[in-house]
Amino acid sequence: MSYFGDIYKGIKTLLAGMSVTGKVFLNNKNNTITQQYPDNRETLKMFDRFRGEVVMPHDENNEHSCTGCQKCEIACPNGSIEIIWDRQVDPETGKKKKMIDQHIYHLGMCTMCGLCIEACPTDAILWAQNYENSVYDRSALTKVLNQPGSKIMPGVED
Amino acid sequence: MNITLSITTTIYKFLSEYMSEGAANIGAMVTIALIYLAIFAVAGLYLVLLERKVAAWFQLRIGPNRVGPWGLLQTMADALKLVSKELTGTVKADKFLYNLAPYFVIISSLMALAVFPFTQEFQAFDINIGIFFLIAISSIGVIGILLGGWASNNKFALIGAMRSGVQTISYELSVGLSLVTMVLLTGTLQLSEIIEVQKNGWLIIQGHFPAIIAFMIYMIAGTAETNRAPFDMVEAESELGAGFHTEYSGMKFAYFFLAEFINMFIIAAIAATIFFGGWLSPFGITESIPWLGIFWFLGKTFVLVFLMMWFRWTFPRLRVDQLLTLEWKYLLPLNLLNIVLMALIVWLGLTIQL
């Protein structure tokens, strides 16, 4: 009688499977996992852990907190960050010290691993919230993070 | 002019006022063919959309919703894209058979639509061997698949086509025998008369136990015959690329794709007609308004189409040996037993007449 037993078991298990998917189908309105593309750019608040691109925040006096220590450049596994620096005379103390000229960030090479941001001792670089990074020319992906004429925030190096 | 639902005679009468009898006859046929072609090309596209939406809902996704309101124009846009695509082919393909194959598939599935009674008298072609015609036509499509797989000169396409041949030849038996079981009840092959018989209760109620078994076997075999999951070894993506239509692109691919969905509609429509009373409303609630039959017919058909989609997104794909075991060791013997059971029930008059 195992022949008919097999048929009975087969139908039973098939119906069990169908009831599982059927329940999912009926409850899909409340449980949809996928997100729509974020069209509301103005009001959108992305998540804290979202990794858009690396940016260097500046305050209203056009001051950043990058000391030019190059820890991010060393931490970067694929050379996305290049820091051009030189030694200049600090106008306040009159001593020579290391200052960044350009903090160059290649978005096209970045894998969004976040090691540079973890490595930064002064929290000078952060993750941005933007998500539309496509451009028509590859050279547009090479970005200079410090704004022209910016200087380091006083007190960061203390 | 008095417009009845009998479209063939209406168009024939309209045309015969302007031309001779023979020309009017041909004109009426061509007009109906064009109307059916246009309606079912669009209906096929919307079945594709329905499939994608249902798949999305089963997988907790949203589904296509960008093109048009609620994504309603998505498959229209896809069809436009496919029309404008280049028709590529392999160098060593058998050009004639390669180009012939998609037309075999699409024409055989469109031909089957002619005999369905959508509502009272709304039937393009009411022949007295209706079910026989449907079974015969629906198995021609596999020739197109075999041709396509053979002529592409591609190993994966050939394997897919051969699997399709094995599958269709096997499951054709179950489809035929489960329909024969129901024919024992009706005593006729003509679809309009089968529906007349069901005015005393749908056949699945009239035939009770064996009819339910026949319906289950029919749905399993019908799903296999349309080469849909869980019986989609013909185009098993993980094994064969795209199976028999690997080498097809553009509109030829679209024909295969459309034919699959129209076949699904046909299998569901046969089931709705034979088992669930076609255009008859439940308990005869809208008997006085004949055109509402279209609504009931399509409603029943779409419930069954949904059932097939439910199968697709629930069950994993069978292996070839499992497929043949299921057919030859389980469905076929059960079907033969079921015929004997049904014959006994009809002979002893144990059917349920409402």
Image (tube, coloured by chain):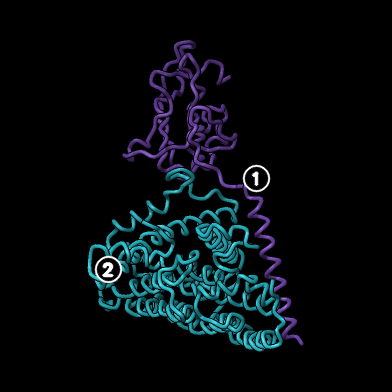
Q: Where is residue A155 in the image (x, y as percent from the top left)?
A: 56, 16
Q: Which amino acid does label 2 sit on?
A: Ala
Output the chain of dot 1.
Answer: A
Please, which residue is most extreme toward the right here?
Answer: A1
Query: Which is more toward the observer, A101 or B42?
Result: B42
Q: Is residue B254 above or below residue B157?
A: above
The residue where tag 2 is placed is B24
Query: Which is more toward the observer, B231 or B48?
Result: B48
Q: What element carries label 2?
A: helix
The residue where tag 1 is placed is A30
Q: How far apart are marks 1 and 2 (CA)?
A: 57 Å
Q: Look at chain B in the picture and name its colour.
A: cyan
Q: What residue type is labelled 1?
A: Asn
Tag 1 and tag 2, C-beta contact below 8 Å: no
Residue ID at (42%, 43%): A109
Q: What element carries label 1?
A: helix
Q: Where is residue B332 in the image (x, y as percent from the top left)?
A: 60, 86
Task: Classify mark 2: residues with Cα within 10 Å, few (<14), some (14-19) or many (20+).
Answer: some
Q: In this view, does A98 lie above or below B308?
A: above
Query: Which is more toward the observer, B253 or A157?
Result: B253
Please, which residue is most extreme toward the top here?
Answer: A92
Output the chain of dot 2.
Answer: B
Q: Look at chain A in the picture and name its colour.
A: purple
Q: Quadrant of the C terminus of chain B?
A: bottom right
Residue ID at (44%, 74%): B126
Q: Is residue B89 something one can see in this rendering?
A: yes
